Amino acid sequence: MSHVTRQISRRSMLRAAGATAGAVGAGIGIGIGTSVPAAAAGASLVHPGLLHTRADLDRMAARVKAGAQPYTAGFAELAANPHARSDWRPRPSSVVHRGAGSPQNYAALYKDIHAAYQNALRWHITGESAHADTAVAILNAWSATLTRLAGSADRFLAAGLYGYQFANAAELVRDHEDFEAERFRGMLLDVFHPLSESFLAHHNNAVVTNYWTNWDLCNMACVLAIGIHCDDRAKVDRVVEYFKHGEGLGSIRNAIPVVYDDGLGEWLEAGRDQGHALLGVGLMGTICEMAWNQGIDLYGHDDSRFLKGAQYVAKWAMGGEVPFTANTRRKGAIGGWSGSETVTEAAAVNPEMTRPIWAMIANHYTRRRSLPASYVTRIAARSAPEGGGGNYGPDSGGYDQLGFGTLAFTRERTTGAAGAAGTGGSPSATAAAGGAAGAGDAAGARSGADPRPQTATTASPSASPAGGDLAATGSNGLLGWTAATGVTALAGGMLLLRRRDRARREPQ
């Protein structure tokens, strides 16, 4: 029986145990570098509180005004993007189609969403009201017009991707006097949420493993973002539970089914292709960040399992050799056709391919948590400064992430304590930041060449050094990112994980 199949078949056995363990707090992470989240279960939701908190927005504005790098480089990417212009005009439709066999018109939707988000972000940074007016006009136009998402199964992708992005754009202008807030929430709840919830519950009437990881993740992101924006904690809790124990391939242990002795966590879609693997990592990071801003630590869940998966994808995407355990997933429709697909090796990659997903992840683990994450740090450096929708190709894949991570997520390193969830990175508890450095990983980082390390055979605990990943902060932040492949900015190496995570398949 395959690993993926074994996971699904034993999921119900773990659910009760997982629920008991999780009852201690709302999403408290386990293991290295975790801290007690700021918001307890039942507390009011934070606003703005999706990808950006008030502290985040204030930090961006202050750093750009001060001319600090790398914020100014990130803001230059935003200002140069045509979607961020205040003369953008929306093109709403009552029905949006995505997928073969339908008159596809969804490009206007995702372009307008990115225009709303970019203008809203630009308003918060510059204070220029014209950008706020444009963002509000776009959102109001769509909430007054859109009634349905249609098409093939791809309609679930449209609901997931554009639902979470719409909610993030709206969160930035939620208190603007001209924003039709109630009508917009109605659109999210009536048009986007039902499709995303239906997918998570029924997977389009297919067997639960029929759809790859990113299908689950985008719909999880949608339900979570709508839950937060609409102050619906039940929806938030739904996604947290699914992230930890869901049947589909988007739950954490199905998305990252194997953890190896060197601390890399195999990303399931690495066996599919590079583009979808990057999409999945970006979506899981988005879920973790939105949850974190509500006091829920999914980043640290299961001994920071997401970090292990992100490290794996970062190394592989840079052309490094990664281990791969063959897996078989069941495919087919309930009561209809059935089959299976076996993947035996990681797909080929183009090291030049990039997506704006890495700054958010690197800043969380290395600056909020002071954990070494060398592959993530290095690929973030390669990708900086990150742009957004429209900067990564004209097709829909270039709009799958909101982007601008260099501007939005660069932060000071937390010193002496781990940042608390929901506080924008302020210290709240002493960090257990010690990790073990893989010798080969550190060597690869020092050389700045081929990211394939020597085999690490021993490891010993050590505290995160003061001059570790992303050592430079504040106005010198760009130097820290740029130097991430050199000896001055990288003293740690990859996090090696607890012995209970030694190389093996982990039965569920």
Image (cartoon, rainbow, N blue to C red):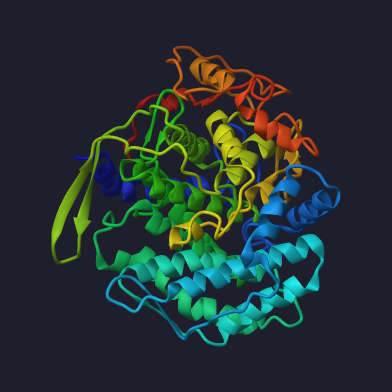
Inspect this view and state whether residue 413 appears.
Answer: no
Tell me which residue sits at (24%, 59%) in the image.
Answer: 207
Percent x, y for residue 40?
65, 55
Where does the C terminus fall, quadrant-wise?
top left
Inspect this view and state whether residue 53 appears.
Answer: yes
Q: Is residue 115 left or right of residue 247?
A: right
Percent x, y for residue 56?
74, 53
Q: Is residue 366 left or right of residue 458?
A: right
Q: Where is 325 relative to 364, above or below? A: above
Percent x, y for residue 429?
72, 38
Q: Where is 489 relative to 11, above or below? A: above
Q: Is residue 360 left or right of residue 304?
A: right
Percent x, y for residue 278?
45, 46
Between 132 and 464, the one nearer to me in the picture = 132
Between 474 and 212, the one nearer to me in the picture = 474
Where does the N terminus fall, quadrant-wise?
top left
Tell me which residue sits at (62%, 66%) in the image.
Answer: 83
Between 70 and 76, the one nearer to me in the picture = 76
| Furthest residue toward top | 458
Q: Is residue 70 left or right of residue 12?
A: right
Tell me which residue sits at (31%, 77%) in the image.
Answer: 102
